[in-house]
Amino acid sequence: MISVLCATRKRKEALKKSLNSLVATAGNPADIELLLAFDNDDVDTAVATLRDFPNAKVLITPRYGYRELQKYYNYLSAIADGEWLFLWNDDAIMETHGWEKLVDKYNGKMVALRCMFKNGNNPEINNRDVLFPIIPRKFYELTGHFSDNRHNDTYLSWIFNTLERCFLLDIVVRHERADFMDYKVNNDSTFAEREYITQLRICRPFRRGVNRDLDILKKYIEQNPGV
């Protein structure tokens, strides 16, 4: 099973569209698990979403915002049942049919799987950047978190690329982020409130977290040949 983790805020229709794309393209929807985190001032969106996706797992949390985005994914990972944890966004659309089956051949491996993506409606597929990573639940069990930084995808890609254990899947995700859509879609307060950290390479907390998790994974891999 793949557990899809999504932190979302005040995007009822965008979230519904996004989740529908995951379910509609899955070869077997029973093999995916939807886990959603909502801020405690956005309960209406949670209630509306559960009407459409009654089997989803929902967390209502304090509002951590983008500054502590990793907390949502860490809390969702704690209640996930899947062997794999899939970072998802409420402005993402799955385009590949049978996408969850493409993960199966990596079962039992300590690897990060990454998706190809399209910027908005641009037909060009990007297979360079590491976005929408899929990692083993075992990573969470070993480290105690999904990520230790708000830039979850960058954090995970740094770790698994260093280990040479990051692999590209033939899964295409369309990212309907406002600046990819000429600001006509999802150009809202949620988009405006993002706070990026620049110069991550020299950010000491980031590097400490990465190095700590690298040490944990190296030890695990040494003790478990074949993973």
Image (cartoon, grey):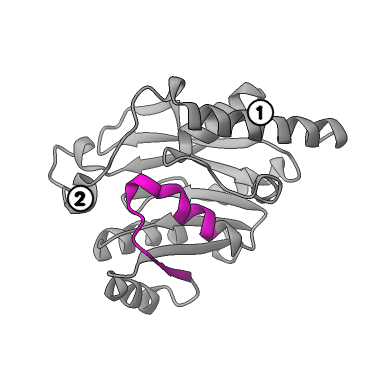
Residue placed most toward the observer, 172 or 218: 218
Determine which of the numbered discs, if any, sits on residue 198 in the image: none
Q: From this view, report whether residue 28 is shown above or below residue 212.
A: below
How many numbered marks appear?
2
Which quadrant holds the C terminus?
top right
Q: Residue at x 36, y 49 (%)?
A: 93
Can the viewer see residue 172? yes
* Residue 65 lies within the magenta run: yes
The residues colored magenta run: 57-76
Can the viewer see residue 225? no
First-in-chain label (2 vs 1): 1
Residue placed most toward the observer, 68 or 181: 68
**Label 1 sits on residue:** 165
Q: Residue 151: horizontal and vertical position, in percent?
A: 42, 37
Q: CA distance from mark 2 to mark 1?
A: 33 Å
Q: Residue 9: horizontal and vertical position, in percent?
A: 29, 60
- Looking at the picture, which amino acid does disc 2 mark? Asn
Q: Residue at x 52, y 59 (%)?
A: 75
Q: Secondary structure at mark 2?
A: loop
The local crowd at label 2, few if under 14, some if 14 to 19, many if 20 or more residues have their Cα within 10 Å, is some
- Looking at the picture, which amino acid does disc 1 mark? Arg
Q: Residue at x 28, y 69 (%)?
A: 42
Residue placed most toward the observer, 192 or 119: 192
Decide if residue 183 is on the left or right side of residue 149: left
* Residue 125 lies within the magenta run: no
Decide if residue 8 is on the left or right side of residue 5: left
Which quadrant holds the N terminus?
bottom right
**Label 2 sits on residue:** 186
Q: Residue 129: horizontal and vertical position, in percent?
A: 43, 27
